[in-house]
């Protein structure tokens, strides 16, 4: 999920940020338009469609993808759907970083010596924006985990017997009054995992941020 949103968001954001003003405005208005769609409802509708298509059966490439999705317990289309709908924020981050970098002196120097646009993008821009974008993806992982658990709780996520905290919570939800301790295990594991990924994102941000490295050097 994170890799899919990172690749799509980087491609779109770098293209928009490095292009002319008219192209940039058109591409970002498309992003603003897509932001108006409720992503969770779209994910639910797509998952309902995929589940119904899997029960009905299909041939060709769609049938092969459905067979692979079934073999993976329903994870394939879940990852694809979440990744394709969560690239918008990544595109905005990448565009903002590119806009700030393409006015830098080293970019002007690369243009002055005759470097092509592709060389400037892959040699000078991408290496400098990849770190913050990876940090942003790590900070989005808790949202992916909660979304998967919510969809599995509704029966639209992974297929049993693939383990999922959402399925475990759904199975123990009926015993909430009679034996509430059963729901604490998966709920606690879900909360601790999302908290751990938040700490991981903070750690990666500190490791990749030169200003934080300078602050740690002064501290030592």
Image: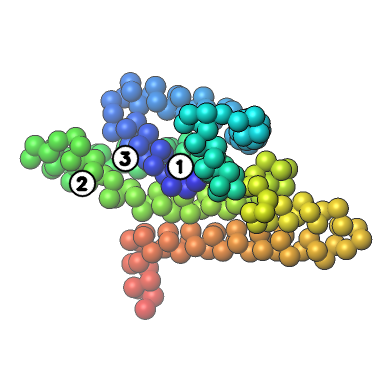
Residue nearest the observer in this picture, 192 or 207: 192
Outermost residue on the bottom side: it is 220
**At x 63% / y 47%, what residue is drawn?**
158
In primary-sequence order, the first of circles 3 and 1 is: 1
User: On screen, 96 above or below 195?
Assistant: above
Q: Residue 5 carries which label?
A: 1
User: On screen, 62 above or below 208?
Assistant: above
**Residue 122 can be seen, yes or no:** yes
Q: Residue 98 carries which label?
A: 3
**Residue 82 can be seen, yes or no:** no
Crowd tier of the residue under label 3, counting other residues whose Cα lies within 10 Å: few below 14, some 14–19, many 20 or above: many
Q: In which quarter of the image is residue 36?
A: top right
Crowd tier of the residue under label 2, counting other residues whose Cα lies within 10 Å: few below 14, some 14–19, many 20 or above: few
Q: Nearer the viewer, mark 3 or mark 1?
A: 1
Residue with the mark numbered 2: 123
Please, what secondary structure does the residue beneath circle 3 have?
Answer: helix
Please, what secondary structure does the residue beneath circle 2 have?
Answer: helix
**At x 12% / y 38%, what residue is drawn?**
115
Coordinates of residue 206 in the picture (x, y in percent): 41, 63
Coordinates of residue 73 in the picture (x, y in percent): 60, 48
Q: Which of marks 1 and 2 is in front?
A: 1
The span from disc 3 to disc 1 (Cα, nearest Å) is 17 Å
Q: Residue 128 carries which label?
A: none
Crowd tier of the residue under label 1, counting other residues whose Cα lies within 10 Å: few below 14, some 14–19, many 20 or above: many
């Amino acid at each position: 999920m994170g890799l899919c949103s990172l690749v799509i968001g980087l491609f779109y954001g770098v293209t928009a940020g490095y292009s002319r003003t008219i192209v940039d405005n058109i591409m970002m208005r498309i992003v603003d338009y897509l932001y108006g769609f409720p992503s969770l409802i779209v994910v639910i509708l797509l998952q309902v469609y995929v589940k119904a298509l899997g029960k009905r059966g299909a041939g060709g490439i769609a049938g092969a993808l459905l067979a692979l999705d079934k073999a993976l317990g329903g994870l394939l289309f879940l990852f694809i759907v979440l990744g394709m709908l969560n690239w918008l924020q990544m595109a905005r981050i990448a565009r903002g970083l590119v806009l700030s970098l393409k006015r830098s002196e080293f970019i002007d120097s690369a243009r002055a010596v005759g470097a092509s646009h592709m060389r400037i993008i892959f040699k000078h821009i991408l290496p400098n924006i990849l770190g913050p974008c990876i940090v942003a993806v790590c900070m989005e992982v808790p949202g992916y985990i909660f979304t998967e658990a919510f969809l599995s709780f509704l029966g639209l996520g992974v297929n049993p017997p693939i383990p999922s905290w959402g399925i475990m919570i759904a199975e123990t939800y009926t015993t909430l009054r009679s034996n509430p301790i059963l729901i604490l295990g998966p709920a606690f594991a879900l909360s601790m995992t999302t908290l751990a990924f938040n700490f991981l994102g903070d750690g990666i941000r500190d490791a990749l941020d030169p200003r934080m490295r300078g602050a740690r050097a002064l501290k030592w």
